[in-house]
Image (cartoon, rainbow, N blue to C red):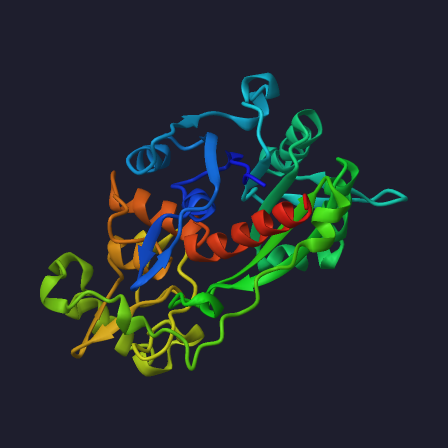
């Protein structure tokens, strides 16, 4: 049987972590991630500067768009819908039975993804979010989110995947929700299992030597001395100073504002403290070195910190394709 070319529509695309992983065809830390039998036919995001990063790296265009105004008739026919929808604003409406509500406009965006699923009816979808969504509203929101996806006509599974389990030097847990129209595909699908490795990939594999790092990334003596007056650097909470022989803690979207007094990860090398460069963050997130970064440092940090690790998405998409292929036999 000739294998099908699976067309993908990407919502909330960001700089393209999900899309790079969904298509494959890249190399990272000496491992080759083969080109999958997929094609991104439409991508969109609200942030123009981040779309510019995407458009520097993909042959297709990431459209600057507000999903609330996106008409499904303007979206190409596709087999798989992907998207990391915002989750900050969910609330459980005090009704009986309880219903999923929203506190502001960002909370509506999840429902727009469901709307497009109902109207376009792709064979499968992938939604991604932070682990905290499981405990949102004291654990009441997530079951309602799953129910909303099921109401669009899909058989749904979810799981937590940690990037560190797939050869990425970062402890990054994310919730992935996968749905299939076809029950056979649903039954065949399994989330990727952690790779059997002797040990996790250490941060040292992706860190740039200090001699190649611009002085602007290092914290001043004044900043260090100021913190020493209030507390010991060695006791900074949440493990913000990273150990080079271990994976990094989760990198976030606001690394541009990192300080020695924040909880974001920083480096201590050769007796000096510094922030990660955008290229290091890209490596920590499993983007290959030929992935182009454009725009300001702030835009780079935001885009990379919000991205899905491409390597994790590659393993997930491979399993989705395998389930859909085997379900056709």
1, 20: nearer the viewer: 1
- Establish if 22 lies above or below 31: above
Quadrant in which the N terminus is drawn: top right
65, 190: nearer the viewer: 190
* Rendering coords of residue 24 (x, y %): 41, 48
Using the rendered view, name the quadrant where residue 140 is placed.
Answer: bottom right
Residue at the location (25% across, 54% down)?
A: 279
With 156 as the anchor, is 293 left or right in this view? left
- Establish if 185 lies above or below 171: above
Residue at the location (69% across, 43% down)?
A: 180
Residue at the location (22% across, 67% down)?
A: 223
* Rendering coords of residue 285 (x, y %): 38, 57
Q: Residue extending furthest front?
A: 1
Q: Residue extending furthest right?
A: 96
15, 312: nearer the viewer: 312
* Rendering coords of residue 252 (x, y %): 41, 56
Residue at the location (72% across, 39% down)?
A: 181
Using the rendered view, name the quadrant where residue 247 is placed.
Answer: bottom left
With 40 as the anchor, is 258 left or right in this view? left
């Amino acid at each position: 049987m000739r294998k099908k070319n699976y067309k993908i529509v990407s919502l909330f695309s960001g700089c393209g972590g999900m899309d790079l992983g969904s298509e494959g065809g890249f190399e990272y830390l000496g491992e080759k991630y083969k080109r999958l039998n997929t094609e991104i036919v439409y991508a969109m995001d609200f942030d123009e500067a981040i779309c510019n990063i995407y458009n520097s790296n993909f042959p297709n265009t990431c459209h600057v768009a507000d999903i609330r105004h996106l008409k499904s008739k303007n979206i190409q026919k596709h087999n798989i819908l992907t998207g990391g929808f915002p989750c900050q604003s969910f609330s459980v409406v005090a009704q009986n039975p309880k219903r999923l509500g929203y506190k502001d406009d960002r909370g509506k965006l999840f429902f727009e993804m469901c709307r497009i699923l109902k109207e376009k009816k792709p064979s499968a979808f992938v939604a991604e979010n932070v682990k905290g969504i499981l405990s949102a509203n004291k654990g009441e929101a997530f079951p309602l989110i799953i129910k909303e996806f099921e109401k669009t006509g899909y058989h749904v599974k979810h799981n937590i995947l940690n990037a560190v389990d797939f050869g990425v030097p970062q402890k990054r847990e994310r919730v992935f929700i996968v749905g299939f129209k076809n029950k056979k595909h649903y039954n065949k699908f399994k989330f990727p299992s952690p790779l059997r490795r002797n040990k996790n990939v250490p941060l040292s594999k992706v860190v740039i030597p200090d001699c190649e790092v611009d002085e602007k990334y290092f914290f001043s003596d004044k900043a260090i001395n100021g913190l020493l007056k209030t507390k010991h650097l060695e006791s900074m909470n949440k493990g913000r100073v990273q150990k080079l022989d271990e994976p990094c803690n989760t990198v976030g979207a606001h690394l541009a504002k990192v300080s020695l007094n924040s909880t974001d990860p920083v480096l201590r090398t050769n007796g000096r403290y510094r922030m990660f460069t955008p290229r290091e963050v890209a490596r920590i997130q499993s983007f290959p070195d030929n992935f182009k970064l454009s725009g300001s440092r702030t835009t780079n940090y935001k885009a990379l910190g919000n991205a899905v690790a491409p390597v994790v998405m590659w393993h997930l998409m491979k399993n989705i394709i395998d389930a859909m292929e085997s379900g056709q036999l």
